[in-house]
Image: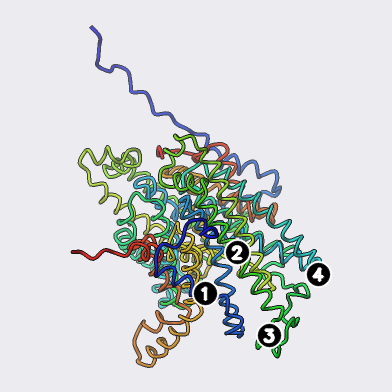
């Protein structure tokens, strides 16, 4: 007689903490190199804020790839569209934006961000139905289709808003920095970090604590099995695609406010950064994407401070280094 | 047939179009000696070769590279920097060639060995990242490349517009350095396209197609796929760098915008897909359609723009503005990927059968 009932606790899933420690180790290792504590804090906060913004933009891309094996080269278009839509709210209401009250400012920013997310999410719906649906499972055509989408979106933005750079000033109450001793921390960076953390926690909660999240994670690991169990993964994917596009739009708004300007080429520029983040993190992994975004931002900020010339290629060097260490990114989720 | 490597256009309409294009390009300096027509014709020649080399990658091996302009830029910059630093003589041109081609080759080899082992999608992303880093480098290392301003330089005596070899009174047209440069480019581009045609019709080219259709099976048959893909990548890089050199010789200038920018990469992609992937001939057709559209569609759109603006229509003037011509070509691109993935050439070779 053997006892088939499990008596002991289930073996715990293996936790791979090495990548998690990487940003912290990197930050600490840079402290002696930078020398001054206050500049280190400023740089670290800057990289955290930048990393969070990149993460917001990249999270959708990595999930979409993980779930459906679709790589959207037009992801940058959602970033630009988000930023442009925000100007529709922020520029007419410039008086409220310039009012010196945090509540008033946020009361304008929040609807602007929501509208951007809604519009880029809706655009995601259209793109998925029109461009991606006909070419499922064909990588080459996906790349071509989405690149074509990127061209059309960029040109359409130029047609609608004109080719000039649109200045987008930060709200008054988010300008300037908090000064603690000799440490200056820009207010907007704190807000960006906050939003980034909320998005990260939100995604993690949905993925780990809800049924939809369970299905998404299962779909990332083995799509056919989930389909065999009777779930319509196409519909799930459409939802993820829309949310991912919406998040890219949100990231676009935040980036535009960070740079205080909007231009259709920003989507193109950020696409490269977002791709590097997604590759570093391991395609399909939200945690890896988060760490990858922080690493990219840190290397950009510290590198820019220490060796300005190196900052130009620092992202590539980082990517090469990470891929040497783990050829499929920090966390390899998919078997692809 | 020998010169076409046994791969003729295989369609009467296609042959006719190609003959018209090539004959048109050959007589352009005699018939339309104006600056604009010459520029358009040169650009068609150079881009036909560049796009054909990209077709070797995209159409024959099925790998999407976004680093093709990088090799184009390496060629351009090699010539520009050599001529700028060493003065206008043939030794400088030779130096540019001797430095530029191996450099492009080495970089293609490195990228290939590093990233062609993985799937097409990673390769696309990695080449995009490398190319954008290269673009930033080129615009920042201003002591070498001239930064955003680029490098203007003078050509050797023989190729200058002022050099008149045969005056107008003798032959009825003027054979000057500019015309000579044009024919140099025309012949070099034609040679490169014929060489590529040779490559894709060789046993090596057949292996590339096998890899495109089913990499796993090609590997099972005993072909070292990484070796073949890397080799193809190097050949494509060499041709692209040579095209870049021709471009530098024609423009007498090299800068980030004319040789490295991401928009050139998109242009190449548009040309190869519209013309027809995996045909080489598609490169000639695609480049001709695209560049003619770029130069003459804008004028047409300008007229439509004025008409729409006068009629007071909303939105339409913005969409028809001459600078928005890429919007329409982008839509054409998506439509052609979707509806006729084999492009113009594929369409002409296999016309859609009418339903009985």
Q: Quadrant of residue B301?
A: bottom left
Please provide percent x and percent y for residue A140. Answer: 41, 53
Separation of marks 1 and 4 at Cα, in angstroms: 40 Å
Taking depth in this image into account, of B88 and B3 the one nearest to the observer is B3
Which residue in the protein does label 2 denote? Answer: B260
> How much space separates mark 1 and mark 3, taking CA atoms?
46 Å
Q: Are marks 2 and 1 on the same chain?
A: no
Q: Is residue B113 above or below residue A72?
A: above
Task: Looking at the image, tell me whether mark 4 or mark 3 is earlier in sequence order.
Answer: 4
Residue B126 picture location, percent across and down: 53, 50
Instruction: Determine if marks 1 and 4 fall on one subunit.
Output: no
Q: Looking at this view, is A89 or A177 the one in front?
A: A89
Name the residue tied to disc 4.
Answer: B87
Q: Which residue is mark 3?
A: B174
Residue at image mark 1: A165
Query: Pointer 2 indicates a residue of which chain?
Result: B
Tell me residue B330's x, y (percent). Answer: 42, 69
Image coords of residue B218 (percent x, y): 45, 39
């Amino acid at each position: 007689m053997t006892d088939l009932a499990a008596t002991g606790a289930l073996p715990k899933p293996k936790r791979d903490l090495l990548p998690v420690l990487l940003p912290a180790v990197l930050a600490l290792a840079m402290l002696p190199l930078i020398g001054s504590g206050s500049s280190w804090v400023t740089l670290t906060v800057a990289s955290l804020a930048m990393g969070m913004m990149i993460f917001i933009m990249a999270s959708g891309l990595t999930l979409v790839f993980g779930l459906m094996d679709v790589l959207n080269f037009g992801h940058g278009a959602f970033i630009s569209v988000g930023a442009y839509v925000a100007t529709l709210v922020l520029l007419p209401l410039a008086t409220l934006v310039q009012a010196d009250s945090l509540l008033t400012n946020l009361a304008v920013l929040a609807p602007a961000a929501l509208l951007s997310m809604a519009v880029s999410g809706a655009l995601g719906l259209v793109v998925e139905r029109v461009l991606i649906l006909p070419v499922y499972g064909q990588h080459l055509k996906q790349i071509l289709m989405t690149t074509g989408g990127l061209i059309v979106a960029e040109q359409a933005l130029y047609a609608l808003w004109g080719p000039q750079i649109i200045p987008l000033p930060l709200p008054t109450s988010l300008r300037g920095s908090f000064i603690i001793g000799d440490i200056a921390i820009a207010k907007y960076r704190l807000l960006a970090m906050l939003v980034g953390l909320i998005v990260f926690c939100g995604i993690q909660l949905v993925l780990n604590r809800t049924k939809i999240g369970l299905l998404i994670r299962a779909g990332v690991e083995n799509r056919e099995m989930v389909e065999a169990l009777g779930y319509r993964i196409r519909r799930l994917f459409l939802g993820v695609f829309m949310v991912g596009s919406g998040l890219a739009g949100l990231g676009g708004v935040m980036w535009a406010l960070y740079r205080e300007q909007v231009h259709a080429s920003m989507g193109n520029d950020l696409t490269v950064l977002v791709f590097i983040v997604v590759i570093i993190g391991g395609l399909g992994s939200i945690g890896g994407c988060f760490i990858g975004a922080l690493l990219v931002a840190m290397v950009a900020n510290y590198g820019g401070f220490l060796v300005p010339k190196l900052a130009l290629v620092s992202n590539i060097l980082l990517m090469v280094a990470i891929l040497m260490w783990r050829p499929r990114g920090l966390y390899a989720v998919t078997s692809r | 047939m020998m010169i076409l490597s046994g791969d003729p256009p295989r369609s009467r309409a296609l042959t006719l179009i190609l003959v018209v294009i090539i004959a048109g390009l050959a007589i352009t300096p005699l018939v339309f000696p104006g600056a604009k027509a010459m520029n358009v014709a040169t650009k068609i020649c150079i881009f036909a070769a560049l796009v054909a080399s990209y077709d070797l990658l995209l159409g024959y091996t099925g790998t999407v590279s976004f680093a093709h302009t990088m090799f184009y830029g390496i060629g351009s910059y090699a010539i520009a920097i050599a001529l700028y630093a060493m003065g206008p003589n043939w030794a400088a041109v030779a130096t540019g060639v001797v430095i530029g081609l191996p450099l492009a080759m080495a970089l293609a080899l490195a990228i290939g060995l590093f990233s062609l082992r993985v799937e097409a999608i990673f390769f696309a992303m990695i080449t995009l990242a490398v190319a954008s880093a290269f673009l930033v480098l080129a615009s920042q290392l201003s002591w070498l490349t001239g930064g955003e301003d680029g490098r203007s330089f003078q050509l050797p005596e023989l190729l200058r517009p002022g050099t008149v070899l045969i005056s107008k009174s003798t032959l009825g047209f003027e054979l000057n350095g500019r015309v000579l440069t044009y024919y140099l480019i025309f012949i070099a581009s034609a040679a490169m396209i014929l060489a590529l045609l040779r490559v894709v019709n060789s046993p090596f080219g057949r292996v590339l197609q096998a890899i495109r259709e089913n990499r796993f099976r090609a590997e099972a048959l005993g072909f070292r796929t990484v070796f073949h893909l890397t080799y193809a990548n190097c050949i494509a890089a060499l041709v692209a760098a040579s095209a870049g050199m021709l471009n530098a010789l024609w423009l007498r200038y090299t800068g980030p915008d004319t040789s490295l920018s991401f928009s050139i990469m998109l242009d190449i992609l548009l040309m190869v897909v519209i013309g027809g992937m995996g045909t080489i001939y598609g490169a000639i057709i695609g480049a001709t359609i695209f560049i003619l559209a770029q130069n003459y569609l804008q004028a047409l759109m300008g007229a439509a723009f004025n008409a729409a603006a006068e009629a007071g229509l909303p939105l339409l003037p913005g969409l028809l503005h001459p600078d928005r011509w890429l919007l329409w070509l982008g839509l054409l691109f998506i439509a052609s990927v979707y509806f006729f993935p084999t492009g113009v050439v594929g369409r002409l070779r296999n016309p859609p059968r009418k339903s009985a």
